[in-house]
Amino acid sequence: MDQLIKQAVRRGQKTLSEYDSKQVLGAVGLPITQEKLAQSQEEAVLAASEIGYPVVLKGCSDKATHKTEMGLVKLGLKDAAEVASAYAEIVDRAAGLDGVLVQEMVSGSREFVLGLTRDPQFGPCVMFGVGGVFTEAIRDVTFRVAPLTVEDAEEMLDEIRLAKLLDAFRGSPAVNRRALADALVEIGKLGCRLNEIAEIDINPVIIRGSQPVIVDALVVLNGRKP
């Protein structure tokens, strides 16, 4: 994980790709989606069959940070023909991709955002809030200076205005709060340990049943060569 980040900084990358970002997060135990990086239509179809339908396809590159706007995201693909067609469309839209990410389709009515920023005065700070497409509009987030204890993280969960979304909600069970708290703690540890990480943006974290699943993530690099 450390080597992946340091090599990206040496190459002058400003961000990690979604796939590499999730590899970093998964390495410290955060709950990422099942996914595989495909280099051909055949690999994409095979990956989809192994993961199980429906799947999502995404163009993957450290430069493709606005994939939806670029037309590089295809949702709810139900069979091999749809996967092959979506793969072809994605690679036609963007040159220089690392590959196409084949990802399980995760459904849930509750979405949160987790993240890390670096404050000029306080250093790495961990963020938690309401996620999804309305994150910027709602702006229901809270911050803590890293490193965090589990108790710090638990307090953060209660500080957002819509904290009741973590409880049993419209027939869905209560969210596994400890899983979210542990994720916040680990994000803080990453920020304290790796100065090459400038920001982490994890949005959305979809609640599937009671469990959080990281559906999209971006690690931003600060460009300081190790």
Image: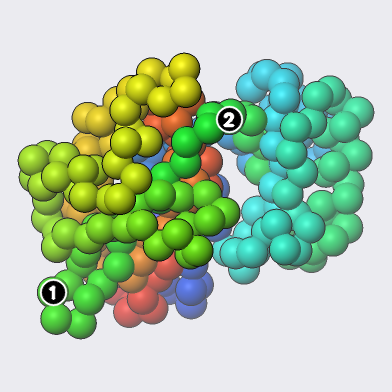
Q: In this view, does 129 lie to the left or right of 100?
A: left
Where disc 1 sits, the SS reads: loop
Residue at 36% from the left image edge and 76% from the top image edge: 222
Name which residue type carries label 1. Phe
Image: 11 above or below 107: below
Residue at 22% from the left image edge and 38% from the top image edge: 181
Where disc 2 sits, the SS reads: loop
Residue hosting label 1: 122
> What colour scheme was applied to this rendering of the protein?
rainbow
Q: Position of residue 47 (x, y in %)?
A: 69, 27
Question: As drawn, which residue projects farthest toward the bottom?
Answer: 120
Mark identifier at residue 189: none
Name which residue type carries label 2. Val
Q: Where is residue 60 in the image (x, y as percent from the top left)?
A: 65, 54
Query: Across the whole image, how many numbered discs are drawn on residues?
Result: 2
Q: Position of residue 51 (x, y in %)?
A: 64, 22
Residue hosting label 2: 106
Image: 55 above or below 220: above
Q: Is residue 70 left or right of residue 150?
A: right
Residue at 40% from the left image edge and 62% from the top image edge: 139
Residue 107: quadrant of the picture = top right
Q: Residues within 10 Å of mark 1 (few under 14, many from 20)?
A: few
Q: Please tell me which residue lies in front, 50 or 6.
A: 50
Question: Rounded to the nearest whole Å, what is the CA distance between mark 1 and mark 2?
Answer: 35 Å
Q: Position of residue 204 (x, y in %)?
A: 49, 46
Q: In which quarter of the image is the C terminus?
A: bottom left
Does any portion of residue 82 appear in the rendered image? yes
Q: Name which of mark 1 and mark 2 comes first in the sequence.
A: 2
Residue at 12% from the left image edge and 39% from the top image edge: 150
Residue 213: quadrant of the picture = top left
Does any portion of residue 22 appear in the rendered image? no
Q: How crowded is mark 2: few (under 14 residues within 10 Å), some or many (20 or more)?
A: some
